[in-house]
Amino acid sequence: MDSEEEKYAAFEEMVKKTVYVDNLSPLVTEAVLKTAFNRFGNVEKVEFITNFTQLRTTAGEFTFVLLISEFCSADYLV
């Protein structure tokens, strides 16, 4: 079983590879985001976040994009 320190270290590594994206058009799809973010690293996962105020899981609100490796500089993503 993993220790708490190992779990936290794994969490920190995931955070370093995750980008939060807000104010997306409802027309944005997983394929669009993967294409856009592949310039910065291979995209492992795109996760649209459920908007519980409108009970929607479609794109258009916000998402997390998980890259396989850390991107070189967050400056490119701002």
Image (cartoon, rainbow, N blue to C red):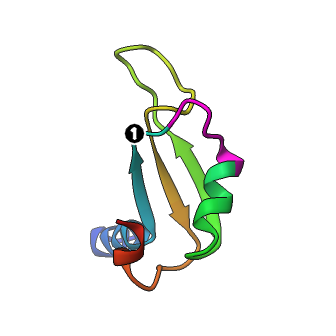
Q: In this rendering, is residue 15 above or below 61?
A: below
Q: Nearer the viewer, residue 28 or 63?
A: 28
Is 28 a magenta residue? Answer: yes
| Extreme residue toward the bottom, this view | 72
Q: In this rendering, is residue 4 above or below 53?
A: below
| Highlighted magenta segment, given as a residue range | 25-31
The image quarter containing residue 4 is bottom left
Q: Residue at x 41, y 72 (%)?
A: 10
Q: Which residue is mark 1?
A: 23
The image quarter containing residue 41 is bottom right
Q: In this rendering, is residue 14 above or below 59?
A: below
Query: The N terminus lies in which quarter of the figure?
Result: bottom left
Q: Residue at x 53, y 26 (%)?
A: 57
Q: Residue at x 31, y 69 (%)?
A: 8
The reply, left or right, for residue 70 in relation to residue 3 is right
| Residue 55 location (% of width, % of height) | 45, 15
Q: Label 1: few (<14), some or many (≥20) within 10 Å?
A: few
| Extreme residue toward the top, this view | 54
| Residue 45 location (% of width, % of height) | 61, 56
| Residue 18 location (% of width, % of height) | 43, 63
